[in-house]
Image (spheres, rainbow, N blue to C red):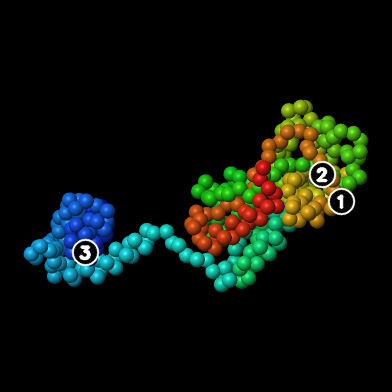
C-alpha cells in the first residue's frame, strides 16, 4: 500500500459531507488551497471528478454519492482503530484470574493483603500465585503469567517495570545467639560463624562473600535453602546465621513476619549493595484496564508497607 495515502480517506469524507472545499478545509484545519490540492489528488486516485460546479455550489457526482456512506464508515473505523481505548472498568463485574510469579518470602508478606485489597473492589476476581523458580521471561512473553515480582534488571529487555520497594540484606540469628552478647558484631566474628543462605542456583556465593574476600576473610556456608523463610526457620533452631532481606522480617502491614519470630536481626558488618524489588509485565498488557488496576493496587500496597525513601 505504498502508493495509498489513508489521509485521503478523511479528506474525502469531509468533502463529501460538506460538499464544499472551504467547509472541508475548515473542518480539518487546513487552508482552502491545501484542500483544493487534496481534491485534485482524490480525483486522480478515483478517476472521477467527485465534486463538480453547479452554479455557485459544488455537487457530488453519481460515483461520489455512491461512495459517501462507505467512505464515512471507513473513515470512522480507521479513526477508531488508531484512537486509544477509553473504557470504564466495572470492578464489581470483573471475573478474572490474575497470575503472579513470586518467591516464597513475597508470598508470605504480601499476598494475603493483596488478595484482600483486590477482593474488596472486585469480589469475583481471583489471584493465582506460582513459584519463582528462575527469572526466565518466557512465561511473561507467552502469557502464562500476568505479573512477575523480582529484582530490577532480571527480566527481558522489552518488559515494563515498576519499582515496588527498596531492600537490603541483614543477618538474622536466634534471640540468644552468642554473636549478640559477646560484643560488637565485627566482620571477623560474622565470618567465624556457620551460615545458612538462600539460593535457587547451583552457585550460592554472593556480594557478602566478595566483600569478605576483600579483607581476607571467608565464611563457612553449611546449608543452602530455596527461600528466606526456610533460612530463618533453620537459624531459629541452630547456631547458624541466616542472610535474609530486611523486608522478610516484616513490614508496616504485617508487623513481624511469622518466620521471624524468635529471631534477632542485625546490620551486616560489611557494605553490600542494596536491592530493588520490581513488578514486571509484558507490554501487551500495559494499557489493559484490569491489569493496570491490579498492578497499581500491588504497587500501592508495597509502598505503604515499605515506604520508599
In the picture shown, does residue 231 fall above or below 100? Answer: above
- Which residue has dot 3 on it? 18
Percent from the top left, x then y, of residue 193?
85, 38
For the residue carrying disc 1, how many other residues have a C-alpha within 10 Å: few (<14), some (14-19), or many (20+)? some
Whichever of callouts 3 and 2 sits on the residue coming sooner in the sequence is 3
Percent from the top left, x then y, of residue 88?
50, 66
At x 26%, y 58%, the residue is 27
**Is residue 239 shown left or right of residue 293?**
right
SS class, disc 1 = loop
- Which residue has dot 1 on it? 262
SS class, disc 3 = helix
- Which residue has dot 2 on it? 265
In this rendering, the label closer to the viewer, 3 or 2: 3
Tell whether label 2 touches label 1 (CB within 8 Å). Answer: no
In this rendering, the label closer to the viewer, 1 or 3: 3
Percent from the top left, x then y, of residue 273?
68, 37
The image quarter containing residue 220 is top right
**Cα–Cα gap, marks 1 and 2:** 10 Å
The residue furthest top is 215
**Cα–Cα gap, marks 3 and 2:** 76 Å
Q: Which quadrant, please, contains the N terminus?
A: bottom left
At x 65%, y 67%, the residue is 120
Amino acid at each position: 500500500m505504498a502508493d495509498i495515502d489513508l489521509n485521503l480517506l478523511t479528506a474525502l469524507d469531509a468533502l463529501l459531507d460538506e460538499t464544499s472545499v472551504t467547509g472541508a478545509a475548515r473542518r480539518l484545519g487546513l487552508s482552502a488551497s491545501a484542500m483544493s490540492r487534496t481534491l485534485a489528488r482524490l480525483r486522480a486516485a478515483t478517476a472521477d471528478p467527485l465534486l463538480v460546479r453547479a452554479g455557485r455550489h459544488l455537487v457530488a457526482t453519481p460515483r461520489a454519492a455512491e461512495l459517501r456512506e462507505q467512505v464515512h464508515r471507513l473513515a470512522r473505523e480507521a479513526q477508531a482503530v488508531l484512537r486509544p481505548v477509553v473504557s470504564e472498568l466495572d470492578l464489581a463485574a470483573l471475573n478474572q484470574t490474575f497470575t503472579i510469579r513470586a518467591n516464597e518470602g513475597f508470598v508470605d508478606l504480601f499476598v494475603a493483603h493483596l488478595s484482600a485489597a483486590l477482593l474488596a473492589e472486585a469480589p469475583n476476581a481471583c489471584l493465582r500465585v506460582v513459584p519463582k523458580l528462575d527469572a526466565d521471561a518466557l512465561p511473561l512473553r507467552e502469557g502464562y503469567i500476568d505479573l512477575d515480582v523480582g529484582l530490577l534488571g532480571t527480566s527481558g529487555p522489552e518488559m515494563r517495570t515498576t519499582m515496588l520497594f527498596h531492600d537490603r540484606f541483614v543477618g538474622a540469628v536466634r534471640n540468644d545467639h552468642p554473636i549478640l552478647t559477646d560484643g560488637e558484631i565485627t566482620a571477623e566474628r560474622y565470618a567465624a560463624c556457620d551460615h545458612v543462605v538462600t539460593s535457587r542456583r547451583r552457585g550460592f556465593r554472593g556480594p557478602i562473600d566478595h566483600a569478605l574476600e576483600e579483607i581476607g576473610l571467608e565464611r563457612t556456608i553449611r546449608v543452602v535453602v530455596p527461600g528466606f523463610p526456610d533460612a530463618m526457620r533453620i537459624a531459629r533452631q541452630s547456631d547458624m546465621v541466616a542472610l535474609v532481606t530486611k523486608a522478610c522480617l516484616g513490614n508496616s502491614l504485617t508487623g513481624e513476619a511469622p518466620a521471624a519470630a524468635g529471631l534477632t536481626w542485625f546490620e551486616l558488618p560489611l557494605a553490600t549493595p542494596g536491592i530493588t524489588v520490581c513488578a514486571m509485565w509484558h507490554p501487551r498488557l500495559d494499557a489493559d484496564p484490569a491489569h493496570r488496576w491490579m498492578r497499581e493496587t500491588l504497587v500501592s500496597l508495597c509502598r505503604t508497607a515499605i515506604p520508599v525513601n
